[in-house]
Image: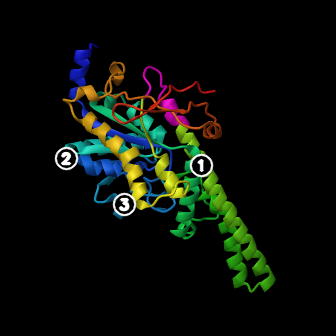
Amino acid sequence: MEKGTAAATNKAKAKVVVVMGATATGKSKLAIDLALRFGGEVINSDKIQVHDGLDVVTNKVTASERRGVPHHLIGGVHPNADYTVDDFRLDARRAVELVLARGRVPVVAGGSNRYLEALLDGDASFRRRYECCFLWVDADLLVLRRYIGRRVDAMLEQGLVDEVRGFFRPDGDYSRGISRAIGVPEMDAYFRLLEAHNNNNHKGDDDKNNNNNKLRLRVLLAVAVAKIKANTCALACRQLRKIHRLQTLPGCGWTLHRLDVTAVLAIKVGDVIGNDDAERAAWEADVAGPATRAVAAFLDDNNNDTRAHDRCDDDKDGFVVMQQAVTTTAAAADCCGLQLEKAVVARGRRGFVAMEPPAAVV
């Protein structure tokens, strides 16, 4: 296909913004910010958040956090139902069509990269109809790990234990539905002992046994919390590996616009002295601002010079190619099993962080 024909084809395509990244990097917040700035609606691509229930454990955005932005595919699926990749592809495509029919911008956001890949790379009709702008919210993994620990602690304060207790079943299946969510299987041993402890109390067991059980319960809860934190960090590493793989898909990998949220998270965990104003300023400077400029250029059909300069083959010519970027420090790369290059301290002409090309994955 010649360049002129490809350009004409792309102009006829509807626009979709895609926000991706590891867990706890602020994907939902950025999606909402962009939806407010460009008249959009958010389409969730998290395979666990599509289920009803466990709002704290699954970290669903609250009504106040949504700030009036319509959200799609948040809840609505029975907690025990299996929600497949094909289910998501069908529902997400319908949601995109619905949002566009209202003259608004679809903003797809979530951490289930396999689901995103199925929709954006595995669905030929979607590629033919839509042009996508990919935004990757990334962070130094050492900082992200500390922030994940703080976030799990906050979830405990918000009622994680009581919430999961309502879902506990002695014969529970942790391989399907919302029970797969990190925070549910890790609590199993704690709730089993708690149930036994409560039954023994009803039977009038002596104080010594009760005190022993209380001590064991505290230990088991601490172990469960540690597992939740460790498994969430492991999830972040798996998500990062998948994102890097998406950049190297056969034919034409996804090239992503990297937005570095490290400074924001560093303030949150106390690595850098700052207050709420400093956190908001860092978010605007490093994440929301660059993302807004990228999306504005992407949505502007008449501003081709500020859009990405390259396109893929005929099947994928709707996917905007942006600067390649990788992360982070050697230590963080080691924890993910990746051999990645460090960032080059430089800024692109649109304020994007310029990065060295990725090293081969070993």
Dot 1: within a 10 Å radius of its alpha carbon, few (fewer than 14), some, or many (20 or more) residues? many
Which label's residue is closer to the chain start, 3 or 2?
A: 3
Residue 233 is marked as: 1
Residue pointed to by mark 3:
65
Q: In this view of the protein, which residue sits in the foreground, 361 or 174? A: 361
Residue 299 tag number: none
Q: Residue at x 75, y 70 (%)?
A: 216
Residue 97 appears in view: yes
Residue 102 bears which disc, if any? 2
Viewed as shown, does residue 207 lie left or right of 180? right
Report, in whole angstroms, how far the alpha carbon at label 1 lies from the one at label 2.
38 Å
* Residue 140 spot, x, y in % from top left: 54, 43
Residue type at numbered disc 3: Glu
Which region is colored magenta? 241-254
Which colour assignment does the render follow?
Answer: rainbow
Residue 174 drawn at (x, y percent): 60, 54
